[in-house]
Image (cartoon, helix red, strand yellow):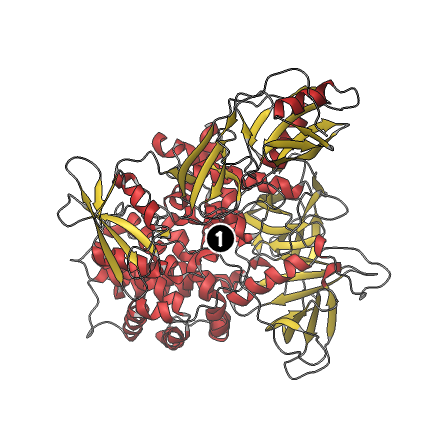
Amino acid sequence: MEADGEGGEDCDFVGEVEDSCSSKTLLPDESARWFHGYIGHREAENRLLAHGKSGAFLIQSKYNDSNLYLSYFHKGTVLHLPITVICGHYFLADRQFRSLTHLVTYFTKSPQSPLVEPFPPPHEIVLKNRRRIALLPYKALKGTDELSFFKGDFLIELQEVSADWIWATLEGRKESGLVPVALTALLDEVSDPTQLPYYHEGDISTLAHRLIRAGKDSFLLRKSSNGENFVIMVNIGMQIAKVLVERRAEGGYLVGGRIFLKVSDVVDRYERTEISDGCQLLYPHIRDKASDYAELKVSNLTRMNSHSSCPQPIASVSALMKTREWKKWKSCFLMLSDANGSQLYLFDSTTRTKPKIIVNLCFCTVLKLDESVFLRDDCVQLVVHGIESNSIYLAFTRRSAFFQWFSHLKWRSLGLRNPNALYVPYSNSKMRCYKPFNFIEIALSTYRSCTLKADVRYIASVVVNGYKLCSTKCRSASPNSSQIIFDAVFFLEWIPIPSEAGSCTIQLVIHSVSNNKKPRIFDSSPVYKLSDSDEDHLSLKGTGDESAFCFEAHRYRITVLPEAHYSSFHALLSAHDFALCQWTSEMLSTLERTVFCRSLIATFLKELTTLVRMVATVVDEHLNSTSAEVLFRSDSFCTTLISSALRMIAFGTVKERLIEILSRIANGFDEGESELDEFLEILKNLIPKLPPAFFAVLSTVADRTALAFPNKPHLRRRSVSAFFFLRFINPLVLFFESSSSTSNILRKFVRIIQNAINEATSLRYSSETSSNSVHILVEILDLLSSQPSQSQVLILRNEYYNYNHADYLAILSFFVSMVLSASSDDDDNNNALQDLPSTDRYECPVRETEVVLNLLQNHANHFIAGHGSISP
């Protein structure tokens, strides 16, 4: 049945129909006041909901969809009705119409129709057909009309949806959707070949090496040797082929006897046709000052055979555990299983078949403990919620194991309460979603009390949500004063938000320590509450006027997304010689910079070549702005980054090997050379057993220093000593301070080491007259700066791969966003910003940063609102 719609003339249509029954969708003229073009259901819903008028409607389309869609707002919701197009006619609600104008007129005048008035598009609809190229990868948000793509993909722009988004389709494929325009570059209007994203400069061998790593069918454009023409280099599998693109005097370019108007037209043709030996131009290698970006891939856990009573384990590791804070660490063996809900099996050893403890992780809360609690930086506290809440403390001897297992436990521990049956299996994949965490930065200045004693030492602890997460070192009351000066700062990470209440509580506790007895509670502060709100940043201050404690605390809330969503941000970090990392770090406080650098190292540890390149870039930048006299002495992004790398890679390993000798030294040091020689010999024998990444970092520092100061060879050793001894070994030695007497002994020992280092790294060193300790130090420094070679690093197995890097990318994006926001707002209260030149303060060196961060924030808001739930 054909309905005769009243009123209105037939509108014009885009395109022509080859036959009367073509299945091709005919789109109305862009001037139609109800046609919104290619926007998809989600964007249509957003527009109609924002308009908020019942009966408002629009018509929209999807690319490669033979139907149009009538979307209308009715009774608080948006409905989408498909308009079927057959033989140039339109079918809706069992009625047939000759044109969309007839269809719209009929339903707006029908008394039974909910359609009242058309909702016009926000701007003129202009349908386009332009080619773009993706400059960065992008992961679409699940449940939206967004389109996922990889770096180098070709896109066809169909329509501008807003100032920031376009509707596009992947060239040669059917997928289409919303694309952030800032992550792409227009190709059709680029006439200068040097402005194309895949144009590169550099020597031929370097460019060929990039294509080898990029893989078959990858290509790039460079100038020819005479500088007049261009050459397309393409990876054809076994070798790199070169295709001459000759510039014609009368205009255009000549390739293989064919004339092309633009170089991009050459790529367009040979993307579909072979250019050489069965090879096509499929994957453009995008220009970047940094080296190639490898797409993020979520590591798959390798399933192992079942061990004893643990069904289908997915991970296992040897670790240390204890059930009380004051008890000694005991060896244990951990296994993780998801067969009956997420369960953790704890065995006394690998040979035992019966587990000592089985923990249902859904009823647990996992907390990351600051290194000040147990003098270890690899500890977690597993709080089991049952009839009584119990805690299990776990420590991991390898940093890679800590990364992997903290990620496993964090995402499986839901913090649920089950007072009736502690070990009832519970599994709900929807609850294991990516969620926000609290991070707290706290600075404790002083504590005042008139009852302090001069012969007693005191420790201050920070208790968050009822659990101790960090402690200060032992301090005594100031002479003739009723206060203790702590001057301690902490950054507490990954604090779960309680399921029953979003508020975060903080309490400060003072313990007294005397005569090697167990610490006793001396005093405590009130419980302060950082109430839950929509704000990502809340502050709290306690002053001596109202409390015995003088402190300041800031709470930050960070949402972690699936790792693939950070692909664009990950690419920005290494782009332009890590300019974004350096710019961000210089604007952070000392503590924030340390956390930022730790997260950077955790992100790039799985890519040793990228890590080495980052170290080389940062060291070169530092050497250009410093003199030999103060080499690596001041605190900067360079020194913080490299110190963080060394600590994360080998601090735990070295500490375990030096415990015995340092304990003996702390109990009595005679200032002779015998104990110093013994300590250095143990250290020298330990060095060959350190991870290859440790050598890669230090040898890179030494090599870059030698290149910067070719006439001062002794600076090679000094650069290594500045990091290995000054910022790695010396803090490790002072880790064993337990009282004022041991503190004085260890500090004296550190000064003796430093005096020997000064001689070993200066022109005064002599193989004949220097002491034996100095000779050993020279051997240590030469060992550290000479191995392994970079080629060895490339082939060595990297153990830092099997953990969730999204955790650390989330922290990095938070700091970059904070700095970008502060620099944009000209925050006069930010001291770090005030110290910078105005050009550095305001201008972010990577222009895509703000766009990428806004996209991440939109995705985070989507997950927080409960629209998406993704298991890690």
Instruction: Choose top left, top right, bottom left or bottom right for residue 531.
Output: top right
347 to the left or right of 761 = right
Instruction: Choose top left, top right, bottom left or bottom right for residue 706.
Output: bottom left
Q: Position of residue 858 (x, y in %)?
A: 58, 38
The amino acid at mark 1 is: Ser
Q: Which residue is mark 1?
A: 599
Query: Which residue is farthest left?
Result: 226
Judge whether 632 appears above or below 51 on screen: below
Q: Is residue 216 visible?
A: yes
The quadrant the N terminus occupies is: top right
Secondary structure type for disc 1: helix
Task: Residue at 48% x, 50% y: name it.
Answer: 567
Front residue of 163 and 443: 163
Judge whether 431 appears above or below 158 on screen: below
Instruction: Choose top left, top right, bottom left or bottom right for residue 678.
Output: bottom left
Q: Position of residue 648 (x, y in %)?
A: 47, 61
Q: Is residue 551 visible?
A: no
Task: Residue at 35% x, 74% y: name it.
Answer: 673
Label 1 packing within 10 angstroms: few (<14), some (14-19), many (20+): many
Front residue of 319 and 55: 55
Task: Residue at 70% x, 44% y: name it.
Answer: 505
Judge whether 723 appears above or below 79 on screen: below
Q: Position of residue 438 (x, y in %)?
A: 63, 46
The quadrant the C terminus occupies is: bottom right
309 to the left or right of 41 = right
